[in-house]
Image (spheres, coloured by chain):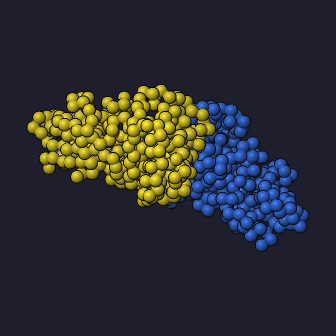
Chain colours: A yellow, B blue
Amino acid sequence: MKEIKLFCPATIANVSCGFDVLGLCLEQPGDEMIIKKSFTPGIQITKIIGQDLPLETEKNVAGVAGLALLNELKDFKSGFEIEIYKNIKPGSGIGSSAASAAGAVFGINQLLNQPFSAKELIPFAMQGEFLASGALHADNVAPALLGGFTLVRSYEPLDILKLPVPNQLIATVIHPQLEVKTADARAVLKHTVPLKKAITQWGNLAGLISALYTNDYDLLARCLHDEIVEPLRSVLIPGFNEVKESALVNGALGSGISGSGPSIFALSKDKITAQKIGDAMATTYKKFEVDYDVHVSSINKEGIKIL
Amino acid sequence: MKEIKLFCPATIANVSCGFDVLGLCLEQPGDEMIIKKSFTPGIQITKIIGQDLPLETEKNVAGVAGLALLNELKDFKSGFEIEIYKNIKPGSGIGSSAASAAGAVFGINQLLNQPFSAKELIPFAMQGEFLASGALHADNVAPALLGGFTLVRSYEPLDILKLPVPNQLIATVIHPQLEVKTADARAVLKHTVPLKKAITQWGNLAGLISALYTNDYDLLARCLHDEIVEPLRSVLIPGFNEVKESALVNGALGSGISGSGPSIFALSKDKITAQKIGDAMATTYKKFEVDYDVHVSSINKEGIKIL
């Protein structure tokens, strides 16, 4: 195989009670990437369509992630050209950089006849995340590479689990075209949290994990709360409370900030409800005259796909 | 049925990463209780063997829990006599008061032809816990009444789940005869925790829940850590670090404080290892010339038993 074409999906990190540990892979939206073997060693980003992003390898998340993989193999001879067709908007909070970083390492690994497992690719993709955000986080690249729900149990050592996905689950995501700077999203976090709230949060996360294993949608709904981060970060997203409320009123199991925002997600258990939630969410931003995209997507159980 | 004889088991609360939410039911040790219908309305504690505990209904955890049940039914005519044969030492940290409170409501519910489900009995038993410790906690009475591992997902509203139990799991508990005052165990807790440690803790708890559903003993072992409470409370238990270390060296999946101590538990996956761990744990307290009891027990999946 000399060339591979990929679909690289968007992802929702945190998922309310799972701050910094949970992630979820979507069927839509997603980028496409074409990766080709090349005679020039290293990684060349030859084309980026749809977004204005750097083509220089060391400044591009796909480039950096791909180089991390080649460095690990001590493979200084292989070369790859990458074309990226962006549909996921950078800064949207649904894993735009993760899709590119994960896609690059997935594709290169395929073209090298899979020296690495999907889990082993995660640390390389994390190098792309580090370039994008200054933090080595895995909660978007893990679901992009593994599919479904993923749990980053630990970073040191890196220990990532794939969790089961209740079959009927559907995600609705609204991306209001507002800028939430990563630095601001970080700055509002507090270094300490009240023990009582932490207990509530881990009780909810433990319940959510149980709900995934037992297909218990009522339990899932009871657990989809974030006592700690959402109250702080939601103030950076105008309309958040109204959008969330409209999702819940229209039948969402739960709703919260996707990653560090500004996208807001909701989960429900059928497509008609998910679409209705999307329409209801949109009402707020229509009123505010803020542009938005709405995505209604089932859960992507396999992650990146070969097209 | 006019009379019922019960086995009321010991329980381990917290289980390392599950502070205030997880509990686990043991086969041994346990109290016995005999509950009889009586012509005198209300609850009479007629006999307590094995420990010096108050016979007055309002000062006895079994009495208070039983009255809570009768009050909920607005049943001012039924009367019950309770005999308690204590094998679980009060103040040991393995749910002595919970066994009595849970046993009382379980037995009375049986003699009244089960107006309540096992889960519905939990709030009554919690009234006994409130008498014993001043806190309405459920992490011992829930596993005593439901068996196995239980999760207190939320207190308001009360939402308790029964979790699966990996078949080979065995608990070792050492109870050194040291006094840890509940007030001291509370006082050492901090009202706030670093966000980073809270994330580690909920990652571990989420992993532990996953391990219970998948019978993954290696994952269970990786998750059995408590970054938040154990470092603070273990200083109240002389020898804790040495005992824990000896358990791990001898093959324990994990080890930690049972409830608020002074008992120390370890989990392993076979009886020979569990016994070896018990012997190793005992070495420390032999050296310190502190009396101790060691219990090796499989996990009790049903909770309180009718004898």
Judge by depth and name the residue closer to the eye, A18 or A226. A226
Q: Position of residue B11 (x, y in %)?
A: 64, 52
Which residue corresponds to the image point at 24% horizontal and 30% vertical from the top-left? Answer: A54
Q: Name the spot of residue A100 as percent of width and height, x first.
A: 28, 40
- Whether residue A114 sits left or right of residue A136 in the image: it is left
Task: State the residue in front, A273 or A54.
Answer: A273
Residue extending furthest toward the left: A39
Up-down relation of residue B97 to residue B4 (above or below): above
Q: Name the one closer to the observer, A219 or B32.
A: A219
In this rendering, is residue A272 above or below B3? above
Residue A274 seen in render: yes
Residue B69 is situated, as x and y percent measured from the top left of the image, at 77, 58
The image quarter containing residue A181 is top left
> A114 or A10: which is nearer to us?
A10
Identified at 44% across, 58% down, the residue is A272
Residue at 59 percent across and 49 percent down: it is B153
Which residue is outermost to the bottom?
A: B1
Image coordinates of residue B68 in percent, x first then y, are: 78, 55
Instruction: Using the rendered image of the protein, determine whether residue B220 is visible from the camera's viewpoint.
Output: no
Residue at position x 53%, y 49% from top?
A248
Q: How many marks?
A: 0
Q: Report whether A193 appears left or right of B92.
A: left
